[in-house]
Image: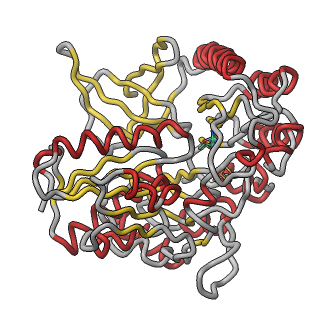
Amino acid sequence: MKLYIETLGCAMNVRDSEHIIAELQKKENYTLTSEISDADLILINTCSVREKPESKLFSEIGQFAKNKKKGAKIGVCGCTASALGEQILKKSPHVDFVLGARNISKITEIIHKPKTAWVGIDYDDSTYVFANSAKSSFKALLNISIGCDKKCAYCIVPFTRGREISIPLELILKEARRLVDGGTKEILLLGQNVNNYGVRFSTPHEKIDFTGLLRRLSEIDGLERIRFTSPHPLHMNDAFLDEFASNPKICKSIHIPLQSGSNAILKAMKRGYTQEWYLNRIEYLRAKVGDVGISTDIIVGFPGESDADFEETMKVLELVKFETMYSFIYSPRPNTLSYSWGSRGAVEKEVAKERLSRLQSRHKEILREISQNELGKIHKVLIENNKSSVGETFSEGRSDTNRLIRIPAFIDMGSFVNVKIDSINGSSLFGKVV
Ligand code: 5AD
Ligand code: SF4
């Protein structure tokens, strides 16, 4: 049997797809195919954080239905499945089943059930999450918690992934050791709110927080790099930032979602921190770690955002100078608090677009500016890719600070090399092995 799977969205979705593939390979003998017409089962694992991917879903289902072989099944998984549930079956006769993001361990059951939707969010997937893990590679994803207990006004995730449950420490350590034994050197820890780890487990558990988890993981011999996404600015206490700074296995790059620089908007978003707290955390971090890559998420056009509010976001961008910025126009999502406000405070589409474009072009300039500081620096790089174009072979890899660096040589994937940055083109870094 052949499986075609399409994955959209965040790292969590990517990891969920790995889990689905492994379950189907192990229990149902599926192998992967990249041809839709070849597949017996077509899965779409998609995201619902913003409206766009969700609306794309139905046109994709139509395309798949047209090109699939006779008798092949189509299933919709992930956050959109959770958000729309039965509606997907009603709206599209081509879909055979719908499996929510909190239910993925039931994939091998649901494929045998016609016209079924399982989208409950009270289901505890936490102990099954490593039952059939993906094969090791030098880089691996590892879940440490599922769901989210926050109630950010714009966010659909608590409705699609349910309440937050931390995965027991022993399971995480066991899985990390298994990955490392199979050749993994870098692990990316995943959770909606990683630094809230340990608040609730599904069964009684020793007390441990995210800082403790990081310490325990870094004791694993052979594990060279630990990354994580995403932490919440609210839970960035000194102990966590001290561990981040002093533990050599923890990569010096961190995602700190700002969302807005305006205190009024942060309050309306129910983010739980202020601009001052956010800047204070950045200052504390930078005082401890000279060279740290900081990335962020920003939403523009949240209901009620005035020009002055937006200027506060621009101010934070100016002060922090993020290495990476993911920015979005606010998209109202059903079930969320801000959705219930209707058109109250709505920011005109054109205004939001203008703000986004101003934010992005200023960030582009900042990135060029800060990239200049990279010239002459030596980075330890984990090689991820080998590529050839117009007769030239080169390798690419990431620094500890998560910058992508290109080296004009063939270097084995999965190896570490020290690279000195010798040229910069815009924000792209180039260097040679030293
Ligand atoms: N509209 C726009 N962006 C959103 N995000 C989450 N929900 C929405 C929404 N309704 C963004 C946030 C979050 C990132 C993953 O997606 O910035 O951090
Ligand atoms: Fe959504 Fe907020 Fe939870 Fe992040 S912390 S997943 S933005 S509710």
Is 390 left, or right, of 162 in this rendering? left
Regarding residue 292, the answer to whether it shows in the image is: no
Q: Nearer the viewer, residue 193 or 265?
A: 265
User: The C terminus appears in which quarter of the rendering?
Assistant: top left
Residue 17, horizontal then vertical, whole percent: 36, 56
Looking at the rendering, which quadrant does residue 89 occupy?
Answer: bottom left
Q: What residue is drawn where x is 65% and y is 66%?
A: 197
- Colour mode? secondary structure
Is 403 left, or right, of 153 in this rendering? left
Regarding residue 119, the answer to whether it shows in the image is: yes
Q: Nearer the viewer, residue 346 or 315?
A: 346
Residue 7, horizontal then vertical, whole percent: 36, 47
Q: What residue is drawn where x is 70% and y is 72%?
A: 199
- Position of residue 277 relative to residue 221, above or below, is above
Q: What residue is drawn where x is 24% and y is 44%?
A: 64
Is 188 left, or right, of 33 in this rendering? right
User: The N terminus appears in which quarter of the rendering?
Assistant: bottom left
- Position of residue 352 relative to residue 239, above or below, is above
Residue 231, horizontal then vertical, whole percent: 66, 52
Looking at the rendering, which quadrant does residue 95 occupy?
Answer: bottom left
Furthest-bottom residue in view?
204
Q: Nearer the viewer, residue 219 or 69?
A: 69
Looking at the rendering, which quadrant does residue 357 occupy?
Answer: top right
Residue 123, horizontal then vertical, whole percent: 52, 76
Q: Nearer the viewer, residue 427 or 350?
A: 350
Q: Tag count in the figure?
A: 0
